[in-house]
Image: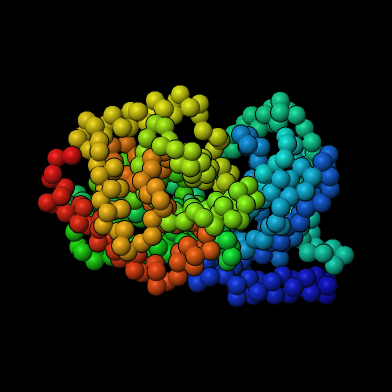
Amino acid sequence: MGSVGGQARKLAYCGAILLALLPAGASVAAAGQVAVTAEIGGDGEHTRYVAFLSKNTEYRIFSISDPYRVVVDLPEANIQVPAGGRGLVLSSRSGRLAAGKSRIVIDLAEPALVEKSGVLPPENGLPARLVIELTKSTHTAFLAKIKAPPPPESGNQGQAASQQKRDLGDKRPVIVVDPGHGGVDAGAHGHSTNTPEKDVTLEFCKVFKEKLEESGKFRIIVTRTTDDFVELDERARMASETTADLLVSIHADALDVKKLGEKNVQEVRGGTIYTLSETASDEQAKLIAQNENKADLQAGVGNEQPLPATVKAEISSILGELENRGKKNRSLALANYLIEHMKDKMKFNLRPQRSANLRVLKAAGVPAILIELGYLSHIEDEKLLTSPEWRAKTATALAAAVSEFMSERIARIPL
Ligand SMILES: [Zn+2]
């Protein structure tokens, strides 16, 4: 038992190091929370995913397709997964799903079945561990196994919206502020500091929201205020259901250094403002939409996008609805207005206005823009995006520009 105590101490010690490395505002393991450290063993036929636990815990496991994934839900835990994959495991990630819930998402290299899983008690100097045995399978066998879908359990669905329902007595315009990503979906990562996009967006939106509220002219709804996962459709729904006047989704881009090379990546920087369109304005916009639309998949929720024809029809009907309400070009007008009024205050991309099929912007009838604040893959941009001074200055200027655009005078100009 002594050695188990030693392992527990070792895990607690890891937690302390993690605490020291985490940026301010990031979530850390609370006292009494389970600490989990995962390891992968085996080969392309049989792979074992082992999560060492600081104490015994309950879990739920299920598989989903498109792409092939195994999802493990745990009570809120401080989880460290290994970098990369091995055998049947391509990669894995972890994070908070909602208050009291954490999740590990395991991406499979090919179809594989969970042969068995279970929590082994502490023994022979090892702590308790959740062992997942994966065996190579076929597409058909994988689909047959997951036929019965798991009971729905996703993030803090509806909570935020119901807490923030439009107050009928409050006639002020409603602006939905949406910090991109969160929880198990970290988004992009910083080039030098590995700072996750979800932290950059959350910290930025805190200031942005505060500054918008200071004017007293708007009612602000925020899609998340903590490091939790919120589905893309849920974010859009918060805007639709409250018949918001505007949705502003905040993100930070990153280019793939492995694919494009360091030199090319360091040549691209600056902010971009996106609006919704059936087809992407260019290749880069198409790529960004693909990446941003993957947020739910990253968190082990949902499947890959439906057929392009369906998506096109869906967007076409949303754009049609905006037209019916006389708001068709309002998103585009705002994007252009912000670029014009922010260009002295924030660095923009060479092509700062783009459009694409971005799932979060599909809030029916609500003008919506998605701002990529800059590139986390660019060394200078990353310094800015992680700087509290830059954040305060830029979020304040953005709030002022949005506020001006939304002001009575401008809002009444027919567009
Ligand atoms: Zn993003």
**83 to the left or right of 281:** right
Q: Position of residue 100 (x, y in %)?
A: 54, 58
In front: 405, or 32? 405
Residue 395 higher or lower than 287, as above or below:
below
- Residue at x 28% of width, y 48% of height: 336
93 w.r.t. 305: above or below: below
Total label count? 0
Please name the residue shown 28% across and 37% down the image. 365
Residue 56 appearing in the image: no
Q: Nearer the viewer, residue 325 or 73?
A: 325
Residue 119: x and y in percent read 75, 53
368 sits to left or right of 70? left
Q: Nearer the viewer, residue 131 or 66?
A: 66
Query: x and y percent of residue 230 in the render?
Result: 46, 49
Placement of the C terminus among the 4 image quadrants: top left
Q: Residue at x 56, y 52 (%)?
A: 264
Viewer-closest of 329 and 184: 329
Q: How is the image coloured?
A: rainbow
The residue under the point 66% across, 54% down is 58
Quadrant of the frame with the N terminus: bottom right
| Residue 277 visible from this viewpoint | yes
Q: Position of residue 161 (x, y in %)?
A: 35, 49
Quarter-wise, where is residue 31 in the image?
bottom right
The reply, left or right, for residue 85 in relation to residue 408 is: right
Q: Is residue 331 above or below residue 379?
A: above
